Amino acid sequence: MLWQSWKSIPLGLPDFTIFYTASQILAAGKGSELYNDNLQESVQRGFSPLAIERRGTILPFNHPPFEAILFLPLSHFSYLTAYLIWAVVNLALLFGLIFILRKHFAVIGQAPPWLWWLAALAFFPIFIALIQGQDSILLLFCYAMAFLSLGRKAEVSAGAWTGLGLFKFNLVLPFAISLFLAGRKKFAGGFAAAAVVLFGLSLMVTGWHGLWRYPAYVWASENNQKYVWNMPHGNIANLRGMVDAFLRDRHLERNILIAVASIILLGAVTFAWRKMWPRSASFPQLMFAAGLVAAVLLSYHVYVHDLSILFLAVAIVIEFLQHEVKIPIWARNSLYVSVGVLFCSPVYLVLTLHWRQLQLIGWVLLALVMVLLHLVESGSASAVEPAPALADK
């Protein structure tokens, strides 16, 4: 896939185009017009005219303004050079993340680093994130740092790390809201502090007028018919995609069912957080995995590369399965099957490129989160002690 994709990278077809476009706009001192389609098209035609012709439209920068600052240094390089630099940054984040995580898993942490690295690259969402030049690996890094912070009972730090992931707010807000509703006030304080700082940076980038335009721009880019590739009805691995696949043309019923299902899942995760944490002597790692999976299901929109954050959830689940914990055989088999499907690259290729039915992965995630919540409720999750690095000193 990398060999086949390489020809399209210099043309500007990867998703990295949106970040490079934003960096060029900021470098030109036009931050207040960051969400101007005409300006974005003018910039993209300057470095990827063939990509626009092939795609039929521009790739709109629909991320929060503050994220554009991260890519501003890349505006001094050509598109291909900037893409390669960001690829190196992503690989550094990934390898650094693995180096840190290994120390916090008692069993699978004993596996050699090269096996961890191959496992990460073999996880299809991470592989696609690298090819597309996406920021999903950065979000995985933020979640991993939040995970380690919670393991040290540093909830403020965990909230701040989670808040730094607001560049993909659709994948962060469900996780943060469940913890807030569960009464984790220190986590909420850290999250709010990070959000305030990022809001201030966004205001610096676009000013009030440009920032005010952002919500409407995001909604328009999500629902505008000209962005056909951004409206994959049913082709998203979350509750919205699962429901949409059955009730595509029945808007009222679809929206009601999505809302009800989301409320039920959010309530179940919140209840599990509230019930599990106080009675556990250590931070409930398996609950964190359940929270990550639920965040994906509750998100409004999710692409294949967005599933990169599930690598952390999978690592937690595999670590749990390696301990001699007595759980029902059906639960153990369900976890193994779910992990196997999530790590099977041909499944993603068939569902995304041939059938365009990625919502089927959503059913796997729903089954996974239900099993995890059951184990949390039954007390099985608290039977696993963290590695020494995660235990309280």
Image: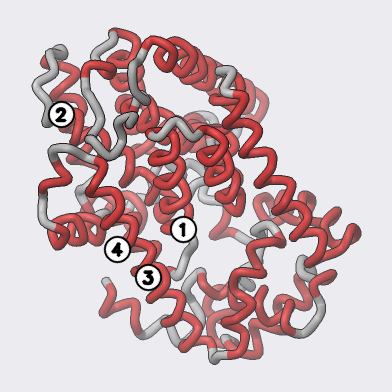
Q: Where residue 377 sits in the image (x, y, percent)?
A: 34, 10
Which residue is labeled 3 in the image?
131
Q: Nearer the viewer, residue 62 or 155?
A: 155
- Answer left or right for 268 relative to 65: left
Q: CA distance from mark 1 to mark 2?
A: 27 Å
Q: Residues within 10 Å of mark 4 (few under 14, many from 20)?
A: some
Q: Nearer the viewer, residue 356 or 275?
A: 275
Viewer-nearest of labels 3 and 1? 1
Asked if disc 4 and disc 2 are in contact, CB closer than 8 Å, the reply is no
Disc assigned to residue 321: 2
Disc assigned to residue 138: 1
What amino acid is found at the position of numbered circle 4 in the picture?
Phe
Which residue corresponds to the image point at 32% horizontal and 49% vertical from the top-left? 351
Q: Nearer the viewer, residue 93 or 30?
A: 93
Q: Residues within 10 Å of mark 2 (few under 14, many from 20)?
A: some
Q: Return the disc, 4 or 1, that comes first in the chain's sequence.
A: 4
Q: Return the disc, 4 or 3, that comes first in the chain's sequence.
A: 4
Describe the element under mark 1 as helix, strand or loop.
helix
What amino acid is found at the position of numbered circle 2 in the picture?
Leu
Describe the element under mark 4 as helix, strand or loop.
helix
Q: Where residue 30 sits in the image (x, y, percent)?
A: 81, 78
Disc assigned to residue 95: 4
Which residue corresponds to the image point at 12% horizontal and 26% vertical from the top-left? 323
Which residue corresponds to the image point at 78% horizontal and 76% vertical from the top-left? 38
Q: Where residue 4 sits in the image (x, y, percent)?
A: 29, 78
Q: Where residue 236 sits in the image (x, y, percent)?
A: 46, 44
Q: Is residue 300 visible?
A: no
Q: CA distance from mark 3 to mark 1?
A: 14 Å
Q: CA distance from mark 4 to mark 1?
A: 12 Å
